[in-house]
Image (cartoon, grey):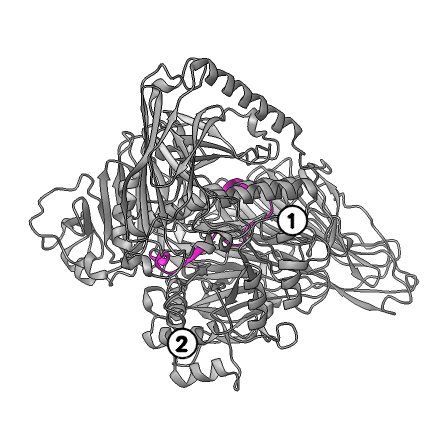
Amino acid sequence: MAGYEGTSLNSEARSGKMIYEPILEEGVFRFDCSADDRNAAFPSISFENSKVRDTPLVNVHKVPTYIPSFECVLGQQIVNIEFPPNTAFYGTGEVSGQLERTGKRIFTWNTDAWGYGPGTTSLYQSHPWVLAVLPNGEAVGVLADTTRRCEIDLRKESNIKLISSSAYPVITFGPFASPTDVLVSFARAVGTVFMPPKWSLGYQQCRWSYDSDARVREIARTFQIARTFREKGIPCDVIWMDIDYMDGFRCFTFDQERFPDPKSLVDDLHQNGFKAIWMLDPGIKKEEGYFVYDSGSKKDIWIQTADGKPFVGDVWPGPCVFPDFTQSSARSWWANLVKDFITNGVDGIWNDMNEPAVFKVYGMLMARSTYEGMKLANGQKRPFVLTRAGFVGSQRYAATWTGDNLSTWEHLHMSISMVVQLGLSGQPLSGPDIGGFAGNATPKLFGRWMGLGAMFPFCRGHSETDTIDHEPWSFGEECEEVCRLALRRRYRLLSHLYTLFYMAHTRGIPVATPTFFADPKDLELRTHENSFLLGPLLVYGSTGRDQELYQMQHKLPKGIWFSFDFEDTHPDLPALYLQGGSIIPVAPPYQHVGEANETDDLSLLVALDRHGILSAFGFWSCLMEAGKAEGFLFEDDGDGYEYTRGSYLLTTYIAEQQSSVVTVKVLKTEGSWKRPNRRLHVQLLLGKGAMIDAWGTDGEILQIPMPSESEVSDLVLASEKKFRIRLESAKRIPDVDNVSGHKGTELSRTPVELKSGDWVLKVVPWIGGRVISMEHLPSGTQWLHSRVDVNGYEEYSGVEYRSAGCSEEYSVVERDLELAGEVESLQLEGDIGGGLILERQIYIPKENTKVLRIDSGIVARKVGAGSGGFSRLVCLRVHPMFSLQHPTESYVSFTAIDGSKNEVWPESGEQVFEGDLLPNGEWSLVNKSLGLALVNRFNVTQVHKCAIHWGTVMLELDDLQQFYSYNFAFFFLLERAISDNPSPSGGGARPPPPRLLLPGESQSPLSLRGRKRNLFVRFVRTVFGAPRDIFDQSHDFVAPRACSCHVHGFDDASCSSDADFDRVFGRRVFAFVQV
């Protein structure tokens, strides 16, 4: 089809229906704006074989059901696909927030999103893919096959809008009969998940960091406080090593003091049934004499700047260079380094920090290189790679996790949807950091999370430095028991999980799916987020602190669902249901996968499918209609590739009821693996936890005589009684907020949330009292998003970068008060030394809930001879870091005191403004593409100097081309002198300067506590709020580039020395506006 089916809007714009051609298989179509656009499209990175996408099928004349429309304007390709009303959307890759995605907009823009929230629009991975489930249960998949930054806009009901740079094809899959059928077809295009070694499906223990081999050995075998995984009977297969094992954070090295003999350490771990996984980051220290840097420089494989020099960026080791994994030579170089690294006994590799910042395919290509290096090292072992960053197709090489989450109930709840969404986007091997990475979990939160996390495809506990211990035994006996029960459950179901992964690897069938997959026509189930499916196994959990699982109504799909347990029911463990018509394998509760033996007893859970098997009382009746069930078990060596040569055993078991006998037998088998000589234990579910046990020999026919209806009734009543006794006698995990932390800290170490009016904030008192998240609800925009330990809204007490006040622990003085008109407030204070206290009040005014204010100041509590002497210089430096979604369409705008108008863009470099060139009380950080701006209003009499600095942060590989991205820094300076002496004669109290008022705001005194004498530092007030509209376009015209915005605040004023006046008040106002 030549040309395009549309109209020209002007010389640069065109629109119409996209042209199409069938590809891959029946029901799959490629759409382009025109034949020229088809020819101009870049090769596919997401397709396993890019030629498949570019090769049309012949003799296929089927017309697609849904044909996208397009508009091409100013280099942007905007695609819309309309679906019937009540269509539900899923997928979109690694995303936070709700399961059903209608109303959401996300950007495929790989981002280090520490502590992300439900409104975060870009996380670590990019999957420009949407699964649309139609009202009748059929489904359609939509892939925007581009490595450029892509906007997926689902805010309009039943409509998918895709925006990215021209030209890119759109691939649709279906409509097919079910969502599973779509995902199977999708997997044929982008590839299936690698077949994981069986040990990698066990529980895995990690921390940033187990900082020495002695600490690792303690955790694994002889931990002095909590004893051991093995001694406590808590199953575990893997111990992870974070960056502290390295020599100065140099990749492929070991610290000779803390990890002097890694091979010996690994041998010790192996003897105790543990595998060892080690981290490798892409940042290579720029240091001559370091063998990795020298060899990479010799081969010229570093990412380069526009002038052909290696790009240098700061990471853990300091100045670093980065391999250009788009070069085959770089991938080969890295793979050979990995090959040599494996000789230390490394069982798996963890690729972290591999966005870097904005490169959509960088993480996937790094994971590929690592995977290939592990295969080079040992072709008889399956590689196991975990990657943080990824793209469509990453599942071919690596597992993933959901990044740096928080130890909060909100993140526990989101973890179900996030794991499921990744599975619906082609990545089935994923899971969260159980218990949360940042902050301290409480015992109840950790236990509840372990209960659910033990059922996720990837199961790992992980926490960051300076948090309390997060091992399963770290939260008291009650929580430890819940963790033990949860992980024993996982190991009993490991054969089922391994079978699901074989199906995912060979056929593309998803592993963990939303509950509605059992009944895609049930519209109510489509938004259910408390449960998920592992094949026919339904896991139903409680994710709210005040939710009691067995006081909730369990919404189940239609059909028959048998509840069961392993005599381990607990209020903090999820409920388990098996779908009628199913058989799943069950194994003994091993301590690690290596304990399993081929001749161990095999158990099968059997749930018959006929509606008639349940009597009016909810249990099996032998007088009712006969039922059937079917299930699968995959077995092989658990590692290696012999299964690809036929050395495996895939057994299909069936159960059939005839009259009063249920017969269980092997229906068929695949593979040449010999069936082990073992006993078969069949547990036939009757309802409400009751079951019949029967024993036989695996491979032989087993006939189970059914009891009478009265006997069944007795069994069910007895089971219900046992269930109630177990539930009532279970030792409940204490519901406490505070847990003991390092250095005696008694903080829960979870961010404090302020939510009122138009704003939601998260504040971490324990490190600098910083604001780490600031979301504007009406626009759905996160203006501020940062790590706990750096950036966000910071405040210092000196001119130098990250001086006192930045990382000190703050105490919460008051919370949720209504003082001076605040509708919600948080008061913090931190000791910054020398008798000085840095105070901060964050609040949303009652009279104007569209704004957010932050008042800050430094007070002298104990200024004396030992606190710095005469005329000590005191400064207040405010340093917020704001996130930019559209960096090349963002700039700083202000009118100077002299009336000149200024627009400062990233390309301008560093600029300093003083005197009449200062902003005249207001500047704006404008995001032109979103039509939004963040406005800072301040009293210009308080400001001495402003500096704007755009510094290179990271080089981008989007589109496989090289671009720059920037940091934005804005500086204010405030200095005051304090004296140890009384005020000089003639000194009097100087009144505060006039306060800057927003429209409708009344003059009212501030209400911060603790006024002390002898310190004269202006208050800085920061306010975000008030929308207005000045742009009339909403198109995204962003080039593939990204940056962060740093706003450093200093305020300069003359000294005052009145002993009765402790503080001069001023204000800086940040206002949110629509532009």
Is 436 above or below relative to 948?
A: above
Q: Nearer the viewer, residue 450 or 616?
A: 616
What is the span of residues highlighted in magenta in the rendered image? 393-414
Q: Answer whether residue 84 is magenta in the image.
A: no
Q: Position of residue 510 (x, y in %)?
A: 35, 45
Q: Position of residue 28 (x, y in %)?
A: 19, 47
* Residue located beneath label 1 in the image: 232
What's the distance in space between the residues labelled 1 and 2, CA to CA?
40 Å
Q: Amino acid at mark 1?
A: Lys
Q: Quadrant of residue 509?
A: top left
Q: Amino acid at mark 2?
A: Asn
Is 991 above or below relative to 212?
A: above
Q: Quadrant of residue 362?
A: bottom left
Q: Position of residue 169 (x, y in %)?
A: 23, 54
Q: Nearer the viewer, residue 198 or 886?
A: 198
Q: Which mark is residue 336?
A: 2
Callouts 1 and 2 close, C-beta under 8 Å: no
Q: Answer whether residue 399 is magenta in the image.
A: yes
Q: Is residue 881 left or right of residue 798?
A: left
Q: Residues within 10 Å of mark 1 (few under 14, many from 20)?
A: some
Q: Is residue 1008 left or right of residue 519?
A: right
In this view, the mark in front (1 or 2): 1
